[in-house]
Image (tube, rainbow, N blue to C red):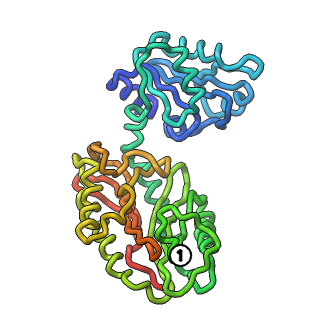
């Protein structure tokens, strides 16, 4: 069954008559491409029997190379209103319940809702999002390939650590590795010394010095899928107290991984990691959720947080990345990407979580 058919089956199961998508991750996953996103309304309307694009005429010729779906074109001089009305009529004039892309521009979403007054509406997380959360074999293979490339980028970056280099220079080393493997850098957090205590530090010109902890959180993008890995390094001896905190964070990773299996709630995985850190007396320094889904977006459902009761299913993929961040001293985060299997989980990286000492 292709992805469009799978979406329609999910729509029927959830009582959804229409799904409206904007150019973005949902559309790219569903069709294998997406038109250029800008301020012009470009919407994919999926009904139970018909689907097509409300398409700016400016982009129609280019997009036609990628799809045989019908277009309801509109010109700048006229605006999208008439084309939207025609498209909605074509895919189902009286929907009872519609699902909107969470990432759609607010003005485009309101335009759809204005044309369908008094219709029940929700976001697409229960239809398309639910399908995207469970990866198929091809998706898992792409994620594994990306994880191995990220391992190589981490290893190369570690080899470049020396007194006087900068966070930015180290990030460039990782970027070069991604590019050599036909991937692009999606993000890079390199934080040396006190910067490692900021979970989302902006990599900059801070100079690496002996005795500093260095957090390295990097990710790449290739063939529609992402990688995400965090490891720790230091130059010469680590700072005082580092070894104890590293062992606690690693134990939290292990506890979370051990908790993963089908039927377990996401929040139970978060609790497993958090309890280890709290029991060691560092609970107030673990300041974020334990993980996030990974796939055609670098952050996507399922979210491994204390507030998420969603039950895990085989094929779900997400990060496990507890951390302890000690203000003015250092921070430690260790991250694996886990795939839920029938009996537990499998991690995608093959790079050990031990501290690298340069």
Q: In which quadrant of the rendered view does residue 244 lie? A: bottom left
Q: Is residue 270 left or right of residue 187?
A: left
Residue for point 56% across, 30% down: 106
Rendering quarter of residue 2 = top left
Q: Position of residue 110 (x, y in %)?
A: 55, 23
The picture places residue 172, in percent across and down from the top left corner, at 63, 70
Q: Please name whichever residue, 289 or 68, is drawn nearer the observer in this view of the structure.
A: 289
Q: Name the residue tied to disc 1.
A: 192
Q: Nearer the viewer, residue 302 or 330?
A: 330
User: Where's residue 171, x and y in %?
Assistant: 60, 69
Position of residue 41 in the picture relative to residue 338 (left or right): right
For the N terminus, the quadrant is top left
Q: Is residue 253 visible?
A: yes
Q: Residue at x 50, y 14 (%)?
A: 116
Q: Residue at x 27, y 43 (%)?
A: 309
Q: Residue furthest bottom?
A: 236
- Image-based side of 237 in relation to 186, left or right: left
Res. 254 in view: no
Compared with 173, 295 (above or below) is: above
Question: For the point 64% across and 36% down, which residue is it?
Answer: 37
Compared to residue 178, the image places residue 209 above or below, namely: below
Residue 270 x/y as whole percent: 29, 55
């Amino acid at each position: 069954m292709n992805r469009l058919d799978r979406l329609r089956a999910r729509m029927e199961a959830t009582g959804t008559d229409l799904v409206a998508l904007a150019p973005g991750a949902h559309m790219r996953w569903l069709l294998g491409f997406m038109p250029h996103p800008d301020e012009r309304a470009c919407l994919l309307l999926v009904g139970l029997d018909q689907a097509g694009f409300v398409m700016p005429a400016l982009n129609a010729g280019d997009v036609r190379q990628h799809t045989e779906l019908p277009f309801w074109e509109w010109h700048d001089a006229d605006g999208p209103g008439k084309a939207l009305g025609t498209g909605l009529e074509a895919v189902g004039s009286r929907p009872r319940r519609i699902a909107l892309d969470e990432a759609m521009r607010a003005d485009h979403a309101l335009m759809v809702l204005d044309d369908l007054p008094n219709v029940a509406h929700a976001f697409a997380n229960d239809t398309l999002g639910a399908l995207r959360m469970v990866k198929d074999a091809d998706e898992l293979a792409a994620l594994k390939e990306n994880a191995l490339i990220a391992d190589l980028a981490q290893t190369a970056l570690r080899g470049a650590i020396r007194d006087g280099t900068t966070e930015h220079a180290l990030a460039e080393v990782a970027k070069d590795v991604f590019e050599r493997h036909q991937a692009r850098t999606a993000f890079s957090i390199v934080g040396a010394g006190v910067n490692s205590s900021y979970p989302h530090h902006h990599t900059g010109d801070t100079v690496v010095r002996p005795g500093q902890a260095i957090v390295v959180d990097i990710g790449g993008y290739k063939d529609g899928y992402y990688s995400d890995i965090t490891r720790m390094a230091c130059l010469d001896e680590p700072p005082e107290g580092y070894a104890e905190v590293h062992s606690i964070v690693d134990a939290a990773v292990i506890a979370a991984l051990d908790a993963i299996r089908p039927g377990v709630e996401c929040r139970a995985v978060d609790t497993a990691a958090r309890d280890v850190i709290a029991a060691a007396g560092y609970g107030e320094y673990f300041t974020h959720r334990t993980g996030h889904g990974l796939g055609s977006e670098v952050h996507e459902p399922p979210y491994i947080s204390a507030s998420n009761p969603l039950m895990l299913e085989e094929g779900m993929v997400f990060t496990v990345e507890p951390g302890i961040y000690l203000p003015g001293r250092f921070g430690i985060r260790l991250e694996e990407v886990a795939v839920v299997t029938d009996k537990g989980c499998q991690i995608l990286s093959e790079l050990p979580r031990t501290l690298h000492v340069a």
